[in-house]
Image: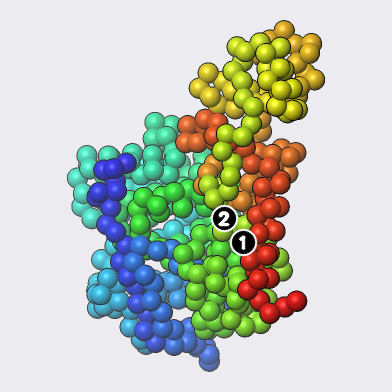
Amino acid sequence: MADTAERAASGAEIQLESVTKRYSGTREPAVSDVTMTIPAGKIVILVGPSGCGKTTTMRMINRLIEPTSGTITIGGEDALSLNADDLRRRIGYAIQQAGLFPHFTVAQNIAVVPGLLGWDRRRIDDRVDEMMELVGLDPAEFRRRYPRQLSGGQQQRVGVARALAADPPVLLMDEPFGAVDPITRGHLQDELLRLQAELRKTIVFVTHDFDEAVKLGDKIAVLGDRSAILQYDTPEAILANPADDTVAGFVGAGASLKQLTLLRVRDVDYRDNAITAGSEESPAALRKRMTDEGRTYALVLDARRRPERWVHVRDLSSATSLAGVGRPVGDSVSTQSTLQDALEAILVEGGNAVVTGGRGEYLGTIDIRTVTDTIQQLRDEHDGGSAAP
Ligand code: ADP
């Protein structure tokens, strides 16, 4: 991993200056006079209604679409004066439904750009394995599979691995998680954030989903017709102060609830607050510890301290051993998870969710109280800062 971080090209700043695109045979430009700076190493989200020009704007950056006028620079270099093929090899590109070549294996798909760049066989093989590990696919299992033999989420991971294979400073992502179910989408988003913490690429990400924008963006550009920039700011600033009614409408109801996607489990107090036991402990001893502390539930951990089961104090009076007592722990959350994800897990789990670390080990728990307190705090801060009674 340190190896990857060292070799990774850090992101490059992208500047669009008065960029316009007029498709032939159309009266109005699809994108009109857009000027914006996308800072190096950040995730910038282009969000707006369907047809507002998001995809056109993004594709002009790698010249899949040629601008009619204006200038685009990447890392200070004029993108329009570079050979378009060279440019595209320096810019990773991931799209909805991954856009994988169906007759290529996973490994061949990931190897496309390194192959075009003339890397030797050995280096490409190593890179394919490294990229697969990076996106959480076991090379031994998946290298030789074809895209149709993968789930939607796995295809999307391969798409991201392929986009990153040649270590480009810039990554363009066009609704990359639009076609997968909400739970898989949440996981892919978490993984993108984890990757980005390590890689620090400049990522331009198109979506029409404002919640996704809030979760992923360092900055969000809310676009109107012809890619007019209605507001370009951090998610916090847009949620707190939408620039106008159109943006407010797009942000939608429940802006304070949406702020839950800005907060992570690591921001709240979850630490080691459950009564835990190893399955070798005697039920009587655990029961005593629980009654002493006035607790009704305890968490049984396995030998590697991974959460196994919740036991109720009344399960213990008749039990002869902790093995097999209680109900299995369901969905857990990580310290990276958003409070929104945690809230979902808490509701599914019926009261609280277990927080686990990188190896699945128990760190603590988070309950509905923590989340409601956080919402209350956000609301107080918001009310404190506004003139409304
Ligand atoms: P978005 O990504 O926000 O949905 P697009 O950039 O795809 O929007 O499209 C912006 C506008 O340009 C739309 O009105 C669309 O119909 C139009 N458009 C897109 N591609 C073409 C094309 N090849 N020829 C003519 N018009 C196009």
Instruction: Using the image, determine if residue 51 lies above or below residue 153.
Output: below
Q: Is residue 318 left or right of residue 175?
A: right
Task: Indicate the position of residue 77 as horizontal and vertical percent values.
Answer: 24, 75
Task: Indicate the position of residue 380 as horizontal and vertical percent values.
Answer: 68, 65
Q: Which residue is mark 1?
A: 259
Amino acid tagged 2 = Leu
Hey, which residue is sitting farthest front in the picture? Answer: 292
Alpha carbons under labels 2 and 1: distance apart: 7 Å
Quadrant in which the N terminus appears: top left
Can I make out residue 12 in this image?
yes
Instruction: Using the image, determine if residue 112 lies above or below residue 302.
Output: below
Hey, which residue is sitting farthest top in the picture? Answer: 320
How many other residues sit within 10 Å of disc 2, few (<14), some (14-19) or many (≥20)?
A: some
Callout 2–callout 1 Cβ contact below 8 Å: yes
Q: Is residue 147 left or right of residue 134?
A: right
Can I make out residue 174 in this image?
no
Task: Indicate the position of residue 130 as horizontal and vertical percent values.
Answer: 33, 41
How many other residues sit within 10 Å of disc 1, few (<14), some (14-19) or many (≥20)?
A: many
Task: Indicate the position of residue 30 as horizontal and vertical percent values.
Answer: 51, 83
Question: Residue at 55% across / 31% down in the picture?
Answer: 362
Among the 4 quarters of the image, the one containing residue 47 = bottom right
Q: Which residue is mark 2?
A: 263
Among the 4 quarters of the image, the one containing residue 240 = bottom right
Question: Residue at 36% across / 44% down in the picture?
Answer: 131
The front one of 24 and 199 is 199
